[in-house]
Image (cartoon, rainbow, N blue to C red):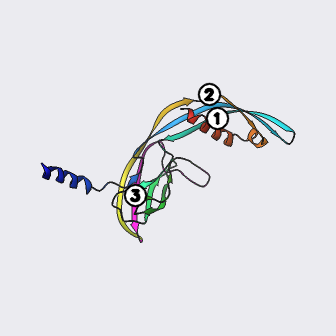
Amino acid sequence: MKAIVLGLFLAVSTQSWGLGLASGNHFETISMEGRVIVHCSENNQRDTAYYNCGAVALSPVEFDYIVSSELNADKVTVNYTDSRGKNRSKSVNFDANKQRSTKRVNLWIGTLLQRPLLHSGDNQLEFVATKNGQVVRRENTTVSVVRGEDRQCTSRTYFSRSLQDCRNSSFICQKYFQDENYCD
């Protein structure tokens, strides 16, 4: 009996886990919307704005570490195709002691300077781990992003000391979703 238990322990403890995202290969989008009224005042000027805020978040995370087990590497590059069909790559340093990337990679947030790693549907990712420029592991995986629930937040009113909040909705809507715990 001890030999069977020891054999199972050795088989499990020496198994090499894949190279991939810490949160796994299955993600879900959450669509949120709600209404906000902002009353602004600054230097004897007043204004009021009405916003219909909307956002699509990725669950469980929008930024994630690349992880592995028993990987002696100093860099990981992820090759992928973005939502516009362009082939792209992202590289991050890898901490072999922690068995994860030193930074989280952007999975979902699109900005002027950054493209997200994932888009809705199936995403084919190639992870290439290197040590001093030499490839030590290469793995392909499919990460799926499916449409999740639609959430409606309760309406909220804010009072601001900046007129900018009555002219641009981005900060107020971001604060609103955080304050509403992402309509949960």
Q: Secondary structure at mark 3?
A: strand
The local crowd at label 2, few if under 14, some if 14 to 19, many if 20 or more residues have their Cα within 10 Å, is: few
Q: Which residues lie in the magenta part? A: 111-132
Locate residue 143, reporting x and y percent: 41, 46
Q: Which residue is mark 1?
A: 53
Q: Which residue is mark 2?
A: 154
Locate residue 11, reporting x and y percent: 21, 54
Tag in front: 2 or 3: 2
Locate residue 95, reporting x and y percent: 43, 62
Q: Secondary structure at mark 1?
A: strand
| Residue 83 disc label | none
- Of label 1 and label 2, which has the lower sequence position? 1
Mark 2–mark 3 Cα distance, whole angstroms, equals 41 Å
Mark 2 belongs to which amino acid? Thr
41 relative position to 175: left or right: right
Mark 1 belongs to which amino acid? Cys
- Of label 3 and label 1, which has the lower sequence position? 1
The local crowd at label 1, few if under 14, some if 14 to 19, many if 20 or more residues have their Cα within 10 Å, is: some
Mark 3 belongs to which amino acid? Phe
The question of residue 123 being in magenta is answered with yes
Residue shown at the point (64%, 35%) measured from the top left = 53
Q: Which residue is mark 3?
A: 127
Q: Between 86 and 150, which is closer to the camera in this rendering?
A: 150
